[in-house]
C-alpha cells in the first residue's frame, strides 16, 4: 500500500561505499570514534566488574552503612546509574563537536555525487 510511495521518495544515488570507507576523512572519523569509545567502554566495564566482584566477595564491605539504612552497595549501585548518564552526555557532547561535522562533510560529498579517492591508505 504505502510502500510504493515510500520507495519512490527514497531513491539513492549510486555510491561506491568501499571508496567512501577508504577515504581519508572516513578513516579520520572512524579513528576519532574508536579513540573515544574503546577506552571509555573499557573503563565502564572495569567499573561494573568491580561493583559485581565487590558485591559477591566483599559482603561485609558492601554492607557498611553510609547513613540511616543506606549501605555502600546502594550508593555504588546508584553511582553505576549516574555513570551511565554521565558517559552518555559526554559522548553526545564529543560526537557533536568532533564526529558530526566530519560525518556531515562525508554525507554532503556522497549526496553531491563527488568522487572519493580510492587510492587512500587506511590508517
Image (cartoon, rainbow, N blue to C red):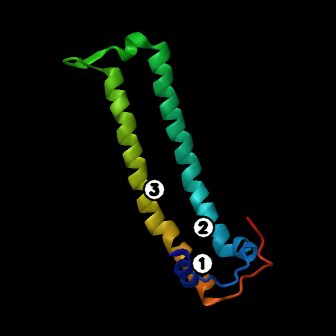
Residue at (61%, 83%) from the top-left corner?
A: 11
Which quarter of the picture shows residue 7?
bottom right
Residue located 78% across and 79% down the image: 118
Cβ atoms at labels 1 and 3 below 8 Å apart: no
Mark on residue 106?
Answer: 1
In this view, which residue lies farthest toward the top?
Answer: 60
Kindly identify which residue carries mark 2. 29
109 over 54 or under it: above or below: below
Of labels 2 and 1, earlier in sequence is: 2
- Horizontal and vertical percent position of residue 113: 65, 89
Residue at x 63% of width, y 82% of height: 12
Instruction: Label 2, secondary structure: give it.
Output: helix
Q: Position of residue 59 (x, y in %)?
A: 42, 12
Dot 3 lies on which element?
Answer: helix
Q: Position of residue 29 (x, y in %)?
A: 60, 67
Q: Are marks 2 and 1 in contact (CB under 8 Å)?
A: yes
Spot the residue most to the front.
1
Question: What residue does disc 3 label?
Answer: 91
Q: What distance separates the C-alpha of mark 2 from that of mark 3?
A: 14 Å
SS at badge 1: helix
Amino acid at each position: 500500500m504505502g510502500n510504493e510511495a515510500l520507495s519512490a521518495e527514497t531513491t539513492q544515488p549510486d555510491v561506491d561505499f568501499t571508496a567512501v570507507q577508504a577515504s581519508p576523512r572516513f578513516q579520520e572519523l572512524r579513528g576519532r570514534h574508536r579513540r573515544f569509545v574503546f577506552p571509555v567502554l573499557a573503563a565502564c566495564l572495569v567499573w561494573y566488574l568491580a561493583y559485581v566482584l565487590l558485591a559477591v566477595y566483599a559482603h561485609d564491605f558492601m554492607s557498611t552503612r553510609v547513613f540511616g539504612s543506606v549501605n555502600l552497595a546502594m550508593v555504588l549501585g546508584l553511582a553505576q546509574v549516574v555513570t551511565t548518564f554521565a558517559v552518555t552526555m559526554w559522548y553526545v557532547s564529543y560526537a557533536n563537536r568532533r564526529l558530526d561535522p566530519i560525518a556531515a562533510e562525508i554525507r554532503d560529498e556522497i549526496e553531491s555525487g563527488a568522487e572519493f579517492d580510492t587510492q587512500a591508505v587506511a590508517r
